[in-house]
Amino acid sequence: MEENWSKFNNLKIQGIPEIRYYVVKRETLLIRLKGNCNVNVSKVQPGMLVQAIGDVINKEALTVQVYSESMETIWHKTEWKCHPIDLIPVSFLIWHLLVPVSSLEERFRLASNGEFCKNVDKLELNSTVWYCEGSNNPSTHLATVKFIGHVPEYGDGYYFGLEVQDNPNIGPCSIVQKYLPTVHSSGTFATISNINTRQTKAMDDIRNFEKNFMSNDLLKSNKTDNLFATKNKDVSKSKENVDTLQINKFSSLIDTDNNNRSARPPEYYVSNVIKVTRPNSIDQLHYNKQSYRNIKYFDPLSNSDEELDMTPIIDQQLPKTNDLRIDTCVKVLVHGETHYGVIRWIGSPEGNNTNKIMAAIELDDIHPSATDGTYQNVRYFQCSPQKAWFADLSECRQYDVAASNCYYKSYLQDFEPIQSLIVRDILPPISVGIRDLEKICGKNRGIQGHHNSCYLDATLFSMFAFTSVFDNLLSRPPNEKDCSEYTEVQKVLREEIVNPLRRELYVGADHVMKLRTLLERSSSISGLTSEEKDPEEFLTSLVAQTLNAEPFLLLSSGQDAYHYQLFVEKDERLVLPTVQQLLEQSFLTSDIKLKKVPSCFIIQMPRFGKAFKMYSKIQPTLLLDVTDIIENSPRQCTVCGKLAKFECKECYGQRGEGLESTAYCRECLDRVHKHEKRNNHKPKNIVVPPEYNFLSEHQPVPRLYLELLAVVCIETSHYVSFVKCAPGSDAEWCFFDSMADRIGEQDGYNVPEVVAFPNLPYWLSEEGAKHLSTVSDDRLLPEHAKRLLCDAYMCMYQSPSIATYKH
């Protein structure tokens, strides 16, 4: 075994240097470079595994291969181009340990936990870990690592070979005996999702506390008393004497044992009373030790000689359990730690011969012992993995969600005392007439920012303040495919954010935090309530995963998407590229088309957060011509202007600019391709509706346009947005910053602001481009112009002829 471990460690250390290992961070498109697959563009999902091969392409992208256990044709022996910002780097060991994990969400969750991955990388033989058998059996056991490596009998990837210390009835297995010859009936194999690294120091501290607590004078008794000989299982029915102990005698225990200390409601620590019911026959030491056991739920770490077979006799003076019902917010102890969640089911589990009433709780956060809604192989509700906890109803304690620290109020200690309304009416977007822009501008306008929320604030303001193109998200009735949080998320978005924004032009950060908390619970995107995120991660969480909307974009490759990432090679000749130029270049390179004109088109610039920008400035296009990127859309011949019947990609840029230069009628196609330089071109047919053949003889072929709706920008780590305040070419523009100002320091609050920016059309015009060409240093530009051009991250477009997004 030692020899095998040595070989494995060498393999880990000496991993091939030109191969790097990643987990996909977000849904993104890949461009095929070479290989067996005949599809030029494909999409990967969060949690998929890729290997980067060779050097970075142009210092902007990686050449990757996608792992697929089923050897799918689309991935097998094919190399793709992918941007590093869409990937989570992991070690050789972690990557191979993630291979056997079948759930993409679980892979993503594990890879995103940097501290966990670091601890796993440090594991050695005889390390002690927690082992959880799985969702059907959520109990945890201490185990010793005896093997890490490939087990061919189980398939690809690496497994942990464990010796389970308290032997949870694991039967002997020939495969286990082959790899763990010194381990007998307590040996098993586990994936990385079934283990958790053991924090030795924390456990030792708990043991030391237990030792000190049990030796306290309060617990000393007459040596003649036989304290633990009698196991009275009917103490709750005996005549009772009630003694009261203040909870502050246990405060150090509770504080150190609760990893989410700030999540406890403040009233929990003040004058909270524990009633200890003590039968006359049990002495002070007995019930104090038992009360300690009930508070601590210390079973996983207890010494066997200290275990007591006694009915719990502790009862906190909190709301009674008969007030609990489905959808009640509760707190419950999970292995000694307080967790918060919502009751999804109440009843007696199948196969339970007692009258015990249990509650199925969907936790706000994950726990390695929690399930996906199953209990003893029976499903009671559906939720994300490791978020369902089953407990006796009597162990659940109700709490007020509006005042709870855990729900969202713990983040809201620094809000300005401005009341944000809840508006249940159906309201249209704000429409600002010419010269009326100042009426909506000023401080405390827009969405109040808080705790890294700017990515969400700027996106929501752009989507809903002045346009209805996304309003279908607010009104679609739920169906059987929707997640359990669908109705609640839609209601909060509609009544607590969008409607107050449109009526009062102000939304408090408490309502936004409520939405963030719900989204973190309902989607695979973690850290939405606290971490810096990107707008596309928010869109994935809200639109794709929670509201389950129809994709905004349908691609000719058969794929769909909610936003489009520009994939382009940098053109050194472009000093100030426009979104029009980059979009056409990206579609040409990817060899794809849109199947139809989208009602909304969200385009992500060729940059990656604050880490990388391909161009120092990009000029958003006010009116985006999408005629040439729509599959089989009627187009004009680039030579004579008649209805085009053919497209030749190889002619791009040779007889004009952009994709418009690739369309030909039959006569012009033949004439142009008689030149010897174009003999090897491969034109394709353009299939257009027959009625256009007649119309083209009498009128020009119409062009298809989308109008710029908003530009979301990032400078360093802060997102802001420029938003069009009404439809039409002469509409006013404003600038929105959810954290424009701050009142106070730690105890202060952020002040959102909307500012007029009437000059935006000038900076996006040809005249503005000429002026920009004379500016040698971007820092000399006016503040808002600089942010618009240098910090553009995402451009949102809408169809002028489509008022709302249709499914």
Image: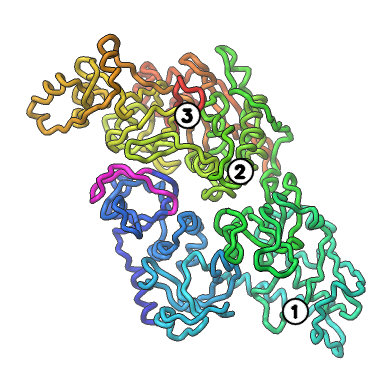
| Rendered position, 401 above or below 573 | below
- Residue highlighted by disc 2: 451
Rendered residue at 76%/75% (across/down): 213
Instruction: In this rendered view, identify the residue nearer to me: 461 or 387.
Output: 387
Query: Circles 2 and 3: CB distance less than 8 Å?
Result: no
Q: Residue 550 in the image: x percent, y percent?
A: 47, 37
Q: Residue 460: which quarter of the image?
A: top right
Identify the element where label 3 is drawn.
strand
Residue 37 as seen in the image, left or right of residue 197: left
Q: Residue 560 in the image: x percent, y percent?
A: 40, 39
Rendered residue at 54%/66% (across/down): 134
Which range is magenta?
29-47
| Rendered position, 261 above or below 806 | below
Q: Residue 755 in the image: x percent, y percent?
A: 57, 23
Instruction: In this rendered view, identify the residue nearer to me: 329 or 414.
Output: 329
- Residue highlighted by disc 3: 711
Residue 804 as seen in the image, left or right of residue 642: right
Q: Nearer the viewer, mark 2 or mark 3?
A: 3
- Residue highlighted by disc 1: 309
Kind of residue sitting beneath label 3 = Val
